[in-house]
Amino acid sequence: MEELNPFEIARKQLDDCAKILNLSDDVREILRNPMRELHVSIPVRMDDGSTKVFKGFRVQYNDAKGPMKGGIRFHPEETIDTVRALAAWMTWKCSLLDLPLGGGKGGVICNPKELSENELERLSRGYIDKIWQFIGPNKDVPAPDVYTTPQMMAWMMDEFSKLTGSNEFGCITGKPVCIGGSCGRDDATARGGIYTIREAAKELGIDLSKATVAIQGYGNAGCNAAFLCRDLFGSKVVAISDSKGGIYNKDGLDLELACRVKSDTRTVTNSPRDTTQKISNEELVELDVDILITAALENVITKENAPNVKAKIIAELANGPTTPEADEILYKNGVHVIPDFLCNAGGVTVSYFEMVQNIDRYCWDVEDVYKRLDDRMTQAYHTVLNASKTYNLNMRQAAYVVAVNRVVEAMQLRGWIKMN
Ligand code: GLU
């Protein structure tokens, strides 16, 4: 059976990289383990007067390069191993983008779709009540992720500020702009990914104005990516999907309509049938398109379906969508994978810009944010591409080599490890 536990996968990827870099066992051991984990129980007063206890986690993986950074997921299937994997990937992500940050991740086991606005507020504040001593602008800075929003970040920042007795805007990123959020943070994950797709298309000689695109996952990242592919490149988005399934139109989908349907009924699958055909998530992954964007959850491309992928580029806007065995198959078949912690690094990059603006108490305009984001993403993409060509590695291995090497150097300079 193929390994599908995200943390085992993250460790396997790291072990491969440790071999390539010839890291000693003790250095590898440090990198294989989170430095700190918080497991908390959060009692929340529900609207009906009862009290429900939610389980939450914050994993602080490695802070050799700076305060830990990473989002908080509110998800019914959250597990500690998923959060550990995501925290490890944040460490490599921040390093790859050369941000002065380490990696962390949070999660709360809950179904936000079943909670009222007031319950969500109490849960957001309750989570901070349990972890606030361990986070802050110089320790660990959370942000939004799957099913968490700028409004939740606002409540969390407010709770942290109350507990510390000062306005700590820099303790959390992804806040609404009017209370210290950054312009351009909303679509930053998608936009950053789009810049890497642009560079990959140049490398492969694909004309994006004639390209077809399928997007698996229609949350913040997937939905923004759809519009950006159409509006910036003129590409045709032929398929999109969410957890309930997907829709397809070979001539291109009406994205505005799909968004309205999604916000009214919570799923794109209720789109009118005259212009769309139903398609399953499994079928979408195997569509004959130029670009496949995976923007949902982990383990979407496995050894079972990897041989059937026809896309020339896979852009991993989600974290962990491809298993290691699938990776090998895709590489052999010549599919150009833009690996997750490169492709989706736009979110944390603009989060970093948000931290910088909070420290300076100054706001950059949106064009400034886009330009800086483009510079960083383009540079990171080419650093990975060059490493992949120089050392004959696939794009994920190359990204690991660059990112892990920098973390090891930081640990060495700080005196945590000695290299012979
Ligand atoms: N949750 C996003 C990620 O996985 C953003 C993290 C952040 O902004 O700190 O990269």
Image (cartoon, grey):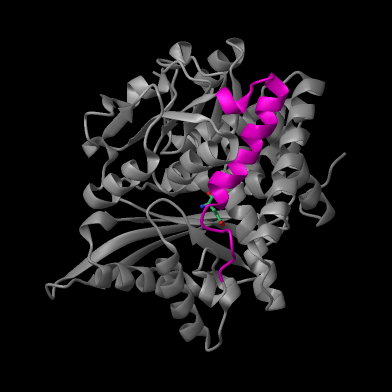
Vertical comparison of 198 with 62: above or below:
above
| Residue 97, visible in the rendered structure | no
Tell me the residue at 44%/79% (across/down). 159
Tell me the residue at 35%/25% (across/down). 249
Tell me the residue at 47%/33% (across/down). 294
Left or right: 347 with respect to 146? right
Q: Residue 365 at what x, y percent from top left? A: 66, 66
Magenta part mainly helix, strand or loop? helix
Vertical comparison of 403 with 154: above or below:
above
Residue sitting nearer the eye, 377 or 359: 377
Tell me the residue at 32%/72% (across/down). 121
| Residue 339, visible in the rendered structure | yes
Left or right: 361 with respect to 413? left
In the image, residue 348 lies in the stretch drawn in magenta = no
Residue furthest toward the bottom?
165
Quarter of the rendering occupied by the N terminus:
top left
Residue sitting nearer the eye, 300 or 130: 300
Residue furthest toward the right?
420
Vertical comparison of 58 with 335: above or below:
below
Left or right: 97 with respect to 128? right
Quarter of the rendering occupied by the C terminus:
top right
Q: Which residues are magenta?
A: 181-210
Q: Residue 267 at what x, y percent from top left? A: 26, 42
Q: Residue 352 at what x, y percent from top left? A: 65, 60
